Image (tube, helix red, strand yellow):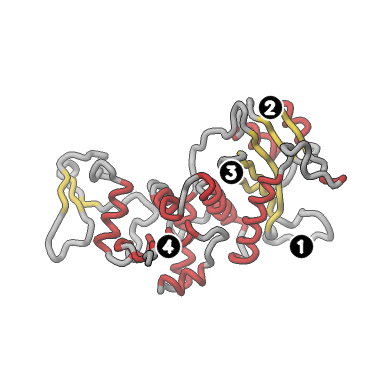
């Protein structure tokens, strides 16, 4: 009988948890987060020494692998952090803070804060443009939730949060929270994040007529006349499928998201889509990739965004 991945020792033993994280963040051995040196570092021992503590004999400072990461200064055991990362990485439509609290045996407030730290780890910084010669990139927009303090409009999305998503067919997804759906919001993001020799696929939005001229090719489907696929290749169904998963997660699992946190939820869904089974990334590998994103993203309760 095959054992569960959650039976792994690092999910239940604190020393194994630190060894697991060290192997992913320090593949060539411990590195001092303060002076950046990797020589003259020793692991501290003794009954009163905390698990996973090293000392740098150049800057004379003690440190652990969690220093400078989203796990720093947390009172939650590292083994629970690793369980949280795995659960969020493996849940296609997300996992609620209430469910995390029950599963991990922590308070709802702690589970909520842990999940936001993990989303921050999933947020990819400094991304190169997507697409390229022979590649197809689909672009589309949608609305989600409600802008705080705005009355519900009779029609349209004036009271909702606007989102732009770019999806490379057979590749990654990249989403952005917009102030509105105007040309001056959408055009710079598309032009900055998609290589010009790409083939752009969109719907019939008027702004794309001008944006599309900057790319090697641009095709659009006309949803207004019931056209969704043309010539078996011209469509925006890939990005529509992304939105299907995103909206089911946001409405069915998370149910409510404040506007100031929307960028982290987008990062979570982008991360899982960009590291999916179809691209050869299973749940374990996806969690490992999330762990590699924890460095340099310290997040505290006082952080407003």
Q: Which residue in the rendered view is the most extreme toward the right? A: 225
Quadrant of the snapshot with the N terminus = bottom left
Q: CA distance from mark 4 to mark 1?
A: 36 Å
Q: Which of marks 1 and 3 precedes in the sequence?
A: 1
Image coordinates of residue 128 in percent, x first then y, are 52, 34
Question: Residue at the location (52% across, 51% down)?
Answer: 272
Counting residues from the N terminus, which is met first, the one under dot 4 or under dot 2? 4
- Where does label 4 land, which residue? 84
Q: CA distance from mark 3 to mark 4?
A: 23 Å
SS under mark 4:
helix
Find the residue positioned furthest to the front: 1
In percent of width and height, residue 284 lies at 41, 54
The residue to which callout 1 is attached is: 151
Which residue lies under the disc numbered 3?
Answer: 174
Foreground tag (3 vs 1): 3
Q: Secondary structure at mark 1?
A: loop
**Label 1, label 2: how far apart the Cα atoms are:** 39 Å
Q: Element under label 2?
A: loop
- Determine whether label 4 and label 2 are within 8 Å by CB: no
The tag on residue 215 is: 2
- State the separation of the CA atoms marked 3 and 1: 29 Å
Q: Which mark is residue 135?
A: none
Mark 4 burial class by Cα count in 10 Å: few <14, some 14-19, many 20+: many
230 left or right, relative to 79:
right
């Amino acid at each position: 009988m095959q054992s569960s991945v959650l039976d792994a020792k690092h999910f239940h033993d604190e020393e194994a948890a630190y060894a697991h994280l060290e192997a992913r963040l320090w593949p060539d051995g411990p590195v001092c987060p303060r002076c950046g040196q990797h020589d003259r570092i020793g692991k501290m021992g003794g009954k009163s020494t905390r698990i996973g503590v090293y000392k740098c004999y150049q800057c004379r400072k003690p440190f652990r692998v969690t220093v400078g990461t989203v796990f720093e200064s947390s009172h939650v055991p590292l083994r629970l952090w690793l369980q949280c990362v795995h659960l969020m990485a493996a849940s296609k439509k997300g996992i609620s803070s209430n469910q995390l609290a029950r599963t991990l045996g922590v308070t709802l407030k702690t589970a909520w804060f842990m999940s936001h730290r993990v989303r921050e780890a999933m947020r990819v910084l400094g991304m190169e443009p997507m697409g390229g010669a022979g590649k197809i990139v689909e672009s589309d927009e949608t609305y989600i939730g409600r802008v705080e303090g705005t009355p519900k409009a009779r029609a349209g999305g004036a009271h909702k949060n606007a989102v732009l998503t770019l999806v490379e067919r057979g590749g990654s997804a990249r989403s952005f929270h917009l102030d509105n759906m105007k040309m001056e919001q959408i055009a710079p993001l598309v032009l900055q994040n998609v290589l010009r020799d790409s083939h752009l696929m969109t719907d019939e939005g008027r702004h794309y007529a001008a944006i599309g001229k900057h790319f090697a090719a641009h095709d659009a489907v006309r949803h207004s006349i019931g056209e969704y696929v043309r010539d078996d290749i011209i469509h925006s169904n890939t990005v529509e499928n992304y939105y299907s998963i995103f909206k089911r997660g946001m409405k069915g699992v998370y149910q409510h998201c404040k506007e100031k946190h929307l960028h982290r939820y987008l990062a979570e869904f982008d991360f899982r889509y960009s590291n999916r089974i179809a691209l050869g990334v299973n749940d374990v590998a996806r969690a490992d990739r999330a762990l590699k994103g924890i460095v340099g993203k310290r997040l505290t309760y006082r952080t407003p965004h």
